[in-house]
Image (cartoon, rainbow, N blue to C red):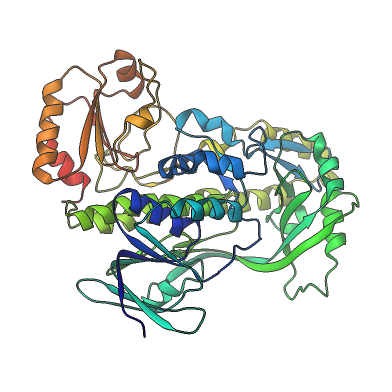
Amino acid sequence: MNKTVHSDVVISGGGPVGLGLAIDLAKRGVTSTVLERASELHRIPKGQNLTQRTGEHFRAWGISEQVRAASPIPPEFGNSGIVMYGHLLSEYHYDWFQRSRVKDYYFADNERLPQYHLERVMRTRVEDFPEITFVENARVDQICQDDSGVDVTYASSDGASHVVRGHFGVGCDGARSPVREMVGIQSDVDHAGPLMALLVFRSMELHNLLERYPGKSIFNVMNPEMGGYWQFLGRVDLDGGWFFHAPVPRGTTVDNFDFHRFLYEMAGTEFALDFEHIGFWDLRISLAKTYRAGRVFIAGDACHSHPPYGGYGVNTGLEDARNLSWKLAAELQGWAGSALLDSYGVERHPVFQSVSQDFIGRMIEDFRQFTSTYSPAKNRKAFEAAWRKRANADDTDVTEFLPNYAGSPLVFGEMGELSGAKGIHCHNARAGHHLAPQPLPDRRDLWNELGDGFTLMNLSGNNEFSERFTDASDSLGIPFQHLRLPQDALRRTYRADAILVRPDQFIAWAGDDFEAQPVEILKRAVGI
């Protein structure tokens, strides 16, 4: 066995979540070793539907321009979708999932690109950081931990065994996470559904057929035969690249099922196509009971697994990384309270629980109820009235998707509030919620003014309050800066005189009570 190598954090899994965690840690001066089992990027188009909040992560990691350049879908397509009844060429359809509707509440735009393009960008970015050691062909075999650290044993491609020691370990190694299993974290399965087929194919003829829906990247067929589950078609590029998810009977194989006919029926017509991949997966929604076991954490699909409904998976995983990163850095740098690392799971667990119940599970049940109740064959008039109602409804899948920590013990939220993924977008500064952007009077970009640690936005002329915060942060050793922004317009918009912003751009405290005690606010914000 080769000699132990030391890093602050050992990360198992070099996908977007593991790479994002490593980059975020490196920007905070924390070293990491990333152990990635594969040597080549997969070519399965997944994780494409990226939110504006994920665009903020890219901005924080310095890869926004590279991600945009890597996308095969132009920005005017975005992530806009459409729902059809019966088949793609149906007379019944409505616009759906228009992420651009919430762009004013974020500091970045949404993106759309296959995960393998994103991983390529992130791997290139990793090379800029001497704090990161990236190891390919590394199969993690064992994790042992003691009071001071973790030892991660992995095998390289030549069969040699190696050990990396770190203060902490993080499993970012997917839905079948070996790390999760090794440390004994169990998962609850909230929903077990059908066998799903994933088809990846090329067809310019289908591209030409769907030009009747300009600017659409996502096509969701509501087929009453699917029992509420989607037939989900998405663009990989504009050169005839497609992926398609749909339920198939148990026991289906590549050899015993006519996938050409399956696609023709979904489209409502025959078209020329060439398959690039046919695979299968089991639809289920699962959630780990805890996100931590001692010095080992899990993130991304290792914590939560669900079908690709709405692109919640990779976006949720990247937010896991941003939440965990600053807390690990705080612990390693000596300014974390005893409750800070536990707050990672406390904050992130209810968010995905809400995603599974309020969005994914609700969508499945909504389709099931509609297709079982209404049909143009049974009663066309009633069907068309119900369809018009759906078409005219607010796009709640986008506008109400608002992950927040309103119930977190680290923030000063309203009494009785709960953390989750559902809310109403607004510019008000609310504890536990993401800070929405506002233009500064001198045209500075507020994003660029926020610090890597905590930032106090003082929107009044009360400089004494800022000074008390500075003194409090110095006494606690917490990285801190303050922005003096005495502007009535900002106070009216944010409905606060002062806002304390966390390192992940969520709000720890907001108010107009200048008698509040900065020491107590900061202590609570870092889990002391």
The quarter in which the N terminus is drawn is bottom left
Residue at 67% across, 44% down: 72
Q: Is residue 448 visible?
A: yes
What percent of the width, then of the height, locates residue 76? 66, 32
* Residue 77 vs residue 420, the one in the foreground: 77
Looking at the image, residue 250 lies above or below residue 307:
below
Total labels: the figure holds: 0
The image quadrant that residue 265 belongs to is: bottom right
Question: How far from the left and from the top, in percent, is residue 62?
Answer: 44, 42
Point out residue 128 in the picture as x, y percentages from the top left corner: 42, 51
Give above or below for 447 relative to 168: above
| Residue sitting nearer the eye, 165 or 465 | 165
Q: Is residue 109 left or right of residue 508?
A: right
| Residue under the image location 41 percent in, 72 percent down | 180
Residue shown at 62% from the left, 63% from the top: 42
Apparent side of residue 157 relative to residue 162 in the rendered image (left or right): right
Residue 41 as seen in the image, left or right of residue 373: left
Please say whether residue 355 is visible from this viewpoint. Answer: no
Is 29 left or right of 153, judged from the image as shown?
left
Which picture quadrant has residue 133? Answer: bottom left
x, y (%) of residue 134? 44, 64
Query: Which of the 4 image quadrants contains residue 434?
Result: top left
- Of residue 159 and residue 189, the one placed in the foreground of this image is 159
